[in-house]
Amino acid sequence: MGRRQDLIDTALRLFYEHGIHAIGINQVLQESGVAKQTLYNHFESKDSLVEAAVEHRDKLFFQWLESRMNSRPAGREALMEMFDAVHDWFNNRVPTLHRFYGCFFINTCGEYSDPEHPVHKRCAAHKSRIFELLKRHALEIYSSETDAEELANALFLLKEGAIVKAHVEGDLDAALKAKAIASRMISPH
Amino acid sequence: MGRRQDLIDTALRLFYEHGIHAIGINQVLQESGVAKQTLYNHFESKDSLVEAAVEHRDKLFFQWLESRMNSRPAGREALMEMFDAVHDWFNNRVPTLHRFYGCFFINTCGEYSDPEHPVHKRCAAHKSRIFELLKRHALEIYSSETDAEELANALFLLKEGAIVKAHVEGDLDAALKAKAIASRMISPH
DNA sequence: CCTGAAGTAGACAGGTCGGTCTATTTTTAA
DNA sequence: TTAAAAATAGACCGACCTGTCTACTTCAGG
């Protein structure tokens, strides 16, 4: 798999669990079994390792969510599947995403609040990609661009809220509650 | 106001802007103009200063939000006012809360992911207090405890989602969009 | 077989970390 | 006025931080 990827995997795991500034380079090296010089051959600084970790998490998470949603018919069912997917994530049933410690991108922005910082920008880009994924499916329901955008936005907010609630308050059913609300929004009764 | 409060104010400001692990004790001391021994007379460790900062933020934020909501009739109007209030917060029109860097409690949980850690617990308690505030007003709308709880939960998720979107993506209108969705939920058309 | 790239271990540098300690000054209250 | 309490500056501790450097090993391709 290559040392570079070993470093990224280990760094991501530690950063996600403990936060970025709480983890030193030496700890990443020790747990990955890679030598220090090797790290600095692949990355010019800790910050650039952080960027690589964020980028990797973006890929991991997006591909996982997209494939979960693709397992259902586009539109309403795929959007509902999103909530089931994050429900599995909250309850540690998705090994690829590691044990649940909230959203890595939200957590990371808490440590890099400057919106111009490359790390913050990458987190914003991730959220933007997710939103576009939702919007794509919302367009299967509403022909109007505006209506689709509004629906995607509502589902996005509910999902982000559920992530926060699950992590901060330890509410492991947050995704299901969000799903119930979302379901009422798509086809009201 | 006393050195103890100076320390808490300065620590909170720095922690909120940069994250907790990124800020050293020495920086808090320098910016507050307090001597090191004085800090350790009032707090037994950095962690206990962190706890005090979280507690202070809890008080600041809750009192601010509650008073904003109390400025409107209980129930629907107060709940709508909540979104206007956080909209002002996002757009830096609430000096008491400092410049907007997302939710301090969410950010802090990203650095203290262990749910048993006292700091994490305090953050959870804050969110719980906010939820109860919403529920109180939701009960003015629905007589049923269950209905009120479901409404409060929905508004809570929308609000948390808006905070995240505003911070990570820099969407300064996130609160207004959340309000529009919430408004449709309370009195559907 | 040889060469060069890649990886290893570990010392090292300069700085910061949280926290303790001493010695001195300022403030407060009896 | 005076004695106790609180705050000060700043040295100091051992540990850890990011990052550099050297010297040695591993290993693949020509």
Image: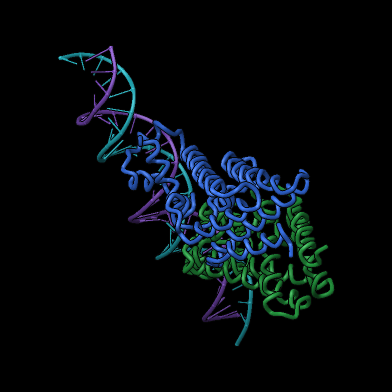
Chain colours: A blue, B green, C cyan, D purple
Up-down relation of residue B108 to residue D4 (above or below): above
The spot of residue A134 in percent (x, y) is: 65, 47
**Measured along the vertical axis of the image, is residue A105 above or below residue A35?**
below
Query: Could you tell me if residue A118 is visible in this image?
Result: yes
Residue at the location (81% across, 75% down)? B74
Q: Nearer the viewer, residue A29 or B134?
A: B134
Q: Residue furthest front?
A: A73
Q: Image height check: is B127 above or below A185?
A: below
Seen from the viewer's position, the closer of residues D6 and B181 is: B181
Place residue C2 in its image quadrant: top left
Where is residue A139 shown, x and y percent of the image? 71, 45
Relative to residue B13, is residue D15 drawn left or right? left
Q: Residue at x 70, y 55 (%)?
A: A154
Location of the N terminus of chain A (image quadrant): top left
* Tally of marks: 0
Q: Quadrant of residue C6?
A: top left
Q: Residue A116's spot in the image, x, y percent? A: 64, 40
Please state if B8 lies on the left or on the right of A37 as rendered. Answer: right
A114 horizontally vs A32: left or right: right
Q: Quadrant of the C terminus of chain A?
A: bottom right
Find residue B54 and report its horizontal and vertical position in percent.
Answer: 59, 66
In the image, residue A58 sits, relative to residue B70, either above or below, namely: above
Visible residue check, residue B94: no
